[in-house]
Amino acid sequence: MITTQQCGTLAVTLASASRIGGRDANADAASVVGNPLGVAAAVIDGIGSSPAVVAAARRAAGTAAIVASHRGAQAGIMAAADTYPDYPRSPNAVAAVASIEPGGRIEIAHVGDCAVWTWSAAAGLRRWTVDQTAGQHVAHMMRNPGLTAMDRAALADHGDKVVAALDDYVLNGLVYATISTISWTPLRGEAADVDLIVLTSDGVHKPLSDEQIAELVERHADDAQALADALVDAGTGLPRTDPDEAPDNATAAVILIRKN
């Protein structure tokens, strides 16, 4: 999907792509929206593959993008959370949302392990989100300056294995999201002077290294749809180290910004 929208003095192209990978159903969803009040993109990664999970992800993506387009990414992701009632065995998902106001103000919000990146020819690729997973929590604790020598020795032997084993265990999802547990980042000044905003589900950024993503972004920096397609094709097309592991759903949304 691709659309072009004027956003103040910015000419913005919005694109998205999604692939089922090796799963039974595609529980990822993406939505890109533009109107006179702003533009927004959302990526939702449903947890599981049931019909209810798939339907909930699609509903949340559309809600997040339309609300974020005129109220910002923070409001967008909380609106998506409101589409996930908390009852036993209810559908759940992780999400990322980005928005741009006509004045050029950019907002990013995420929950779980979807990711948001920016790219510019001057600054290159930058990731703004940290996965809300048990693995990344352990990785953060491994950098704690208060660790004892014994702690450091134990982590040196086992830390990387623990991080890898727990990196798919999300600590937050839309069912449980609150204004204090989502991650929200407003970009201003030089941080907002970017050419691209890219949102990815973990089916893209976990099998691909940051360097591989940067290479694809630079190669397709002038074509939003080609970039979205290249990211999801690469995420689902790589050989797996575990032959029993099927490629995950992979989804990307791209906002290409041109200054008039």
Image: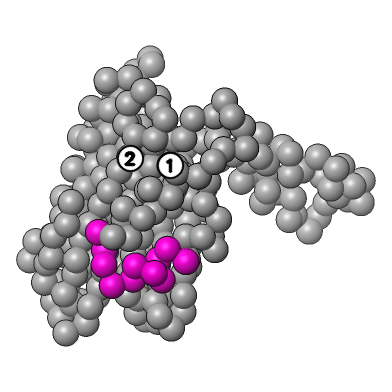
- Residue 154 appears anywhere in the view: yes
**Residue ranking furthest to the right:** 150
Who is closer to the viewer here, 86 or 213? 213
The quarter in which the C terminus is drawn is: bottom left
Label 2 SS: strand
Label 1 SS: helix
Q: Residue at x 39, y 69 (%)?
A: 219
Q: Which residue corresponds to mark 1?
A: 236
* Residue 91 lies in the magenta-colored region: no
Q: Residue 23: x, y in percent?
A: 40, 27
Left or right? Give the position of 214 relative to 5.
Answer: right
Q: Amino acid at mark 2?
A: Arg
Q: Where 256 falls versus 69 (above or below)?
A: below
Assign the magenta stretch its main secondary structure. Answer: helix
Q: Residue 239: x, y in percent?
A: 54, 41
Q: Where 84 falls versus 211 (above or below)?
A: above
Q: Residue at x 33, y 40 (%)?
A: 19
Give the magenta-colored segment's residue range. Answer: 215-225
Q: Where 28 falls versus 86 (above or below)?
A: below
Who is closer to the viewer here, 167 or 99? 167
Left or right? Give the position of 219 relative to 78.
Answer: right
Left or right? Give the position of 66 relative to 227.
Answer: left
Q: Which residue corresponds to mark 2?
A: 19
Tell me which corner region of the image, top left, top right, bottom left or bottom right, holds residue 109. bottom left
Tell me which corner region of the image, top left, top right, bottom left or bottom right, holds residue 2. bottom left
Q: Amino acid at mark 1?
A: Thr
- What count of labels does the image hold? 2
Q: Residue 172: x, y in percent?
A: 47, 37
Tell me which corner region of the image, top left, top right, bottom left or bottom right, holds residue 9. bottom left
